[in-house]
Amino acid sequence: MQQLSYRRRLVPLLALGVVAGLAPGLATGSASAAEPLGPYTRQKLSWKRCAPDKPAAFQCATLKVPLDYRAPEGKRIDVAVSRIRTSDPAERRGILTINPGGPGGPGLDLPLEAADGLPKALLDQYDLVGFDPRGVGRSTPVSCGLTPDELPYPRVTRSVADAAANEAWAGTFAAKCRAAAGDRLPHNSTRNTARDMDVMRAVLGEKKLTYYGVSYGTALGAVYMQLFPHRVDRFVLDSAVDPGRMWRGMFRIWGPEGERAFQRWTKWTADRDRTYHLGGSPAAVARTFWRLVARADTKPIVFGDATLDGPAVRDLSRPELYSVRKGAEVVAMLKKAAEGQSVPGLPAEADSENEIASQTAVLCADAPWPRDPGVYRRDAFHDAARHPLYGDFAASITPCAYWPRGAEPVTTVDNDAPSLIVQNEWDPQTPLTGARAMHRALKGSRMVTVDEGEGHGVVFGDTRNACAENAAMGYLATGTLPDRDVTCHATPGRRGIDR
């Protein structure tokens, strides 16, 4: 699950020049009443090299799926898929499908990335399979014609004027998307993406699916497990969402969780005042931070290539503070910038209009959202008072308040299919409380928690944790879950940990 500001850049898109060879029934639009998805599951894919500058073994194709699975004879859409076949066909046992998160994250390049990072035992066993989820990238993309000024979210809500401006923005955003892709929006859901994955599994000739999903990919994996428990082989869910909070609840939890991270950060930083010069006590460090916010409100801070007001300082800082050392470094740079010194800032990252539009489409289609703008106003003011770092951001209005309702009810996740959940204790995007809720919902799961682990993403995160990585890779290789839940420990000196 990406931060609401959509800063996290995912893998780049590939240029595809591929077509799917359809079974006769699909080509003519007919379908057997006894087997309505037969024309889809029997289609033959035309695999071709993904791009001239990519390895020949990296192949791409286009899968046809129904827009609405309740009416499979109706409109069809494309799902772009990719693969790298096993390095040892004699050892092959199936496919390993990968999702990078989002929603809105393109996944075509993931087999290439995974081939560079997975152990040989897994490369021998699996064809690596990636795909752009429906609405994303090359998969009948959702595009709303949004301008750069209309893309940023979240939006600060500190006053009635802020709330009114945000409501106007959300209404315009939703109206543009309705005009551009209104017939597709109710069907651009996690539930239908999971169904697309199952069609892909069938077309690739596999009885079961092995899967690795990170962040939002854990929600997609869990919904697949709910819909197709008999098709589940080995599922690893990295940095898990709370399936009972999809999606507004997942955003609002960033308010209280951000305060917990802030308190931890002030204590850690106060103990290192000789290094960072932000204050010799937690209270002093907190005062330094809030003075920077107030200073930016009266005179914006030039931070690298960005100019930050108070809300921008809060929005930038929240995820950084979960990694205590990096948070201290960032705030120390902000302090220097406020004093007039030139600082490098943080790398600027921009997401495409399609990523943001398709992400919003999924969030809005998956679950009902309040339709009364007053609900968002009240919640934003309430959460801002209780959780000043991020409460108003996390509770503010979204285009979902004006969006077409999803075609189907929310998917309740409650099953006993086997899976392994891996989670850092201090994850800024998918907090530990959410992963524990996922663990409770998936009764056949085991959970690996990295004590004092920081950052979003464990297996392919910024630093390695051998304990968690061995558990995840071992499960994918052998299919054997740990006998009980496992606690790993963050490596001292990494991810801000200094013991």
Image (cartoon, helix red, strand yellow):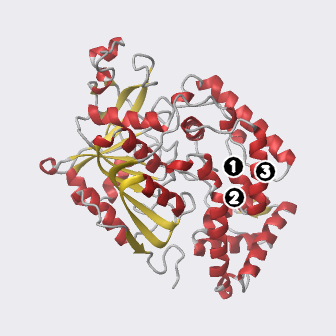
Q: Is mark 2 on a helix, strand or loop?
A: helix
Give x and y (percent) for residue 479.
24, 56
In-front residue for pair 334/260:
260
In-front residue for pair 336/435:
435
**Residue labelled with disc 3:** 157
Give x and y (percent) for residue 140.
48, 28
Q: Amino acid type of disc 1?
A: Pro
- Residue 268 is tagged as none
Q: Amino acid type of disc 3?
A: Thr
Q: In this view, does 411 lie above or below 481?
A: above
Quadrant of residue 253 in the image? bottom right
Circles 1 and 2: CB atoms closer than 8 Å: yes
Q: How far apart are marks 2 and 3 (CA)?
A: 12 Å
- Residue 315 is tagged as 2
**Residue labelled with disc 1:** 154
In-front residue for pair 314/450:
450
